[in-house]
Amino acid sequence: MNILSPGIYLTNRLRFPAKFAVLAIIIVIPLIVLGLRVFNSLNASIDTVAQERIGREYLHVMTPVLRLSMLQRATTNRLLAGDASAAQDLASNRTQLETALNNLADMDARQGRVLETENRVQRLREGARSLMESVKPGLLQDEVFAQWNEQLAQTLNFIYYVSATSGMVLDEDYASLFLIDLSTIRMPREINVAGQIRGITAGLSTGQGLSVPMRGSLESLLKIELQFRAELEQSIRLLKRRAPELAARIGDPIATATSAMDSFRNDMYAYVRGTEFSAQQGQALSARGNVVVAGLYKAQDEIQAALQQELDARYDALLLQREVVIAMCVIMGLLLLYAFFSIYRALRLTIDGLLGVTRRLAEGDLSARVQVSSKDEVADIANGLNLMAEAFASSISHMDRTSYELSDVAARLGTSIGLAKQSMNAQQAETE
């Protein structure tokens, strides 16, 4: 059996409107399914980038908390090391840290439900306030420094948590992903260890040397910093492979900050391995540490600005793409409707012309012809009907001419018979 038989059987029993309806269903349903999948995918990408933008904004508000907490740790270390001038700096920095924590709490009130932060901000505030309020003369410098390290570790863990709940760590764009890796993991870790080293050097400004445990901690921190530095450079290389222009933009401030860190690290190694130390050297190391951390934060600001621009550009591009998809679907639907109605109207006009001509032919008007303006299969039928009508009209004309000729012959034959009859009658009369 011919594979087309079922289709032929069905279409032979449907009028053209029904045929076009079936054809439209066959075409439109897959297009609708495909369009919905594309549309849902775009909406999912838009929602993902929108949540990443919320996460980036949240982390932008958290950066001052991290920076001021590091300053509070360093200033506290200076105060406990015997630097009386640190008291005013400690109070000023505490005010700024309280303001930064309040700003973070406001942001958390707006976006905490989306990012599932729960009560983490409140715990950070309570921990920071507890440490700031507990500072008093006579406390062990090493213990307080370790407590601030724990507080900053919780702050960094919160940064990692927000980057996860906002979907930033699962970004589908490699350039954005490497920027997120730099801004939420690599650079904060580098800043934290540099801040710890700077915090230790802050206690050297009085000219007192470090205790043996503190000196060992400093040497360990320098080794950890080298490891974090290698990871930071690897992340930059990966970004450069995917987005060279973006890597070049953030590369200069990072290179400046890491170069300053290299020099600072060498000086710290010289201090750890040396035997002599003066107050001037301690003040110089403390100042160098401040410059290094400030440079790293400047690089972090550049990374966050680049990430914001990248996310904003992708968000705008996805919105535009969604609008284009919607416009294409609308245009495609209108074109399909226009095409179906145009085809049906063309068929209907030709068929109406055929029906009108056949009706006139049936009424005896042999001059009726179909006006053919198309070149499709229906036009072939119209041309065939015109040829048939011409042939029929020609046959009728020929029959008319033949009938006329026969009538003429019969008339002449009748005349001849009449003359013959008259002649016979005349001859008969003469004979009689």
Image (spheres, rainbow, N blue to C red):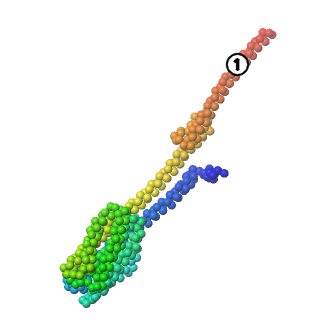
Give the camera-side residue of 415 and 399: 399
Q: Is residue 280 above or below residue 305?
A: below
Type of the residue with mark 1: Thr
Q: Is residue 191 above or below residue 145?
A: above
Percent position of residue 417, x then y: 73, 18
Give the camera-side residue of 234 and 244: 234
| Residue at 78 percent of width and 9 percent of height | 430
Q: Is residue 113 visible?
A: no
Q: Is residue 414 above or below residue 64?
A: above
| Residue at 34 percent of width and 71 percent of height | 230
Percent position of residue 301, x then y: 29, 70
Q: Quadrant of residue 111?
A: bottom left
| Residue at 61 percent of width and 31 percent of height | 394
Q: Is residue 359 visible?
A: yes
Q: Is residue 20 above or below residue 364?
A: below
Q: Tally the marks.
A: 1
For label 1, the crowd category at 10 Å Cα-Cα, with few meaning under 14, some 14 to 19 and many 20 or more, is few
Query: Looking at the figure, which quarter contains the C terminus?
Result: top right
| Residue at 59 percent of width and 38 percent of height | 384
Callout 1: SS = helix
Give the camera-side residue of 353 and 64: 64
Residue at image mark 1: 415
Name the outermost residue toward the bottom: 138
Percent position of residue 257, x then y: 27, 70
Q: Is residue 385 left or right of residue 218?
A: right
Q: Quadrant of residue 377?
A: top right
Name the outermost residue toward the left: 280
Give the camera-side residue of 228 and 124: 228
Percent position of residue 138, x then y: 25, 90
